[in-house]
Amino acid sequence: MTLTEKQKRFCDEYLIDLNATQAAIRAGYSGKNARNIASENLAKPNIKKYIEDRMAQKATKLIADQDEVLKYLTGVMRNEESEEVVIVEGTGDGCSEARVIKKDASIKDRVKAAELLGKRYSLFTDKVDLNADMDLKITVDYGEDEND
């Protein structure tokens, strides 16, 4: 079942602040019935699904995924990323002037990015992973028995 335009508007308004009553009012429902309509709307399966899908889209846009993080770390390591910083310089007459400049990543930051990438790809493994598929037979020799 598809949503009406008013229901879509309700969903979109609801996603702004997660206040169902206010979302119903902003979507054009009557102020007197807004609370009941909001509750009914949130109980409808097609509206629930629409809201869940939209929230998932938002999360995808807002949260960096694995590839984005790896690309950023690689960019820092290769000194392709820079940041803007404010520097203050004296002008010579007792005054100072602030400027914004682009600053490359420090060696420390580049090494840290390389370290994080190395950990991701297990380049610095300290432990040895031995996986052997074989039978093991242990024989214990207690020496000669004096009573025999």
Image (tube, grey):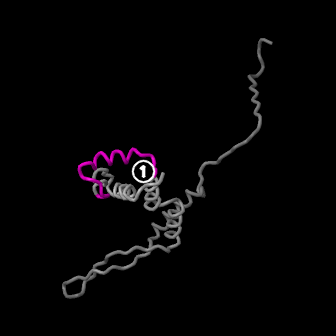
Q: Residue at x 43, y 59 (%)?
A: 58
Q: In this view of the protein, which residue sits in the foreground, 115 or 53?
A: 53
Q: State the image coordinates of residue 103 (x, y, percent, origin top left).
A: 40, 76
- Residue 2 or residue 109, whichever sits in front: 2
Q: Which residues are magenta?
A: 26-49
> Does 135 appear above or below 119?
above
Residue that appears at 37% across and 48% down = 41
On screen, 120 above or below 141?
below
Q: Amino acid at mark 1?
A: Ile
Q: Position of residue 94 (x, y in %)?
A: 19, 84
106 sits left or right of 32 in the view: right
Whether residue 15 sits left or right of residue 52 in the image: it is left
> Magenta stretch: residue 41 in it?
yes
* Left or right, 118 with reference to 99: right
Quadrant location of the C terminus? top right
Residue situated furthest left in the rendering: 94
- State left or right for residue 81 relative to residue 97: right
32 in the magenta segment: yes
Q: Who's the residue at 50% across and 67% down the image?
A: 72
Total marks in image? 1
Question: Residue 32, image x and y in percent?
Answer: 23, 49
Query: Mark 1 — residue?
Result: 47
In percent of width and height, residue 28 lies at 30, 58
Secondary structure state at the residue bearing disc 1: helix
Residue lying at the far right of the rendered structure = 148
Name the foreground residue: 148 vs 19: 19
Categorize mark 1 by other alpha carbons within 10 Å: few (<14), some (14-19), many (20+).
many
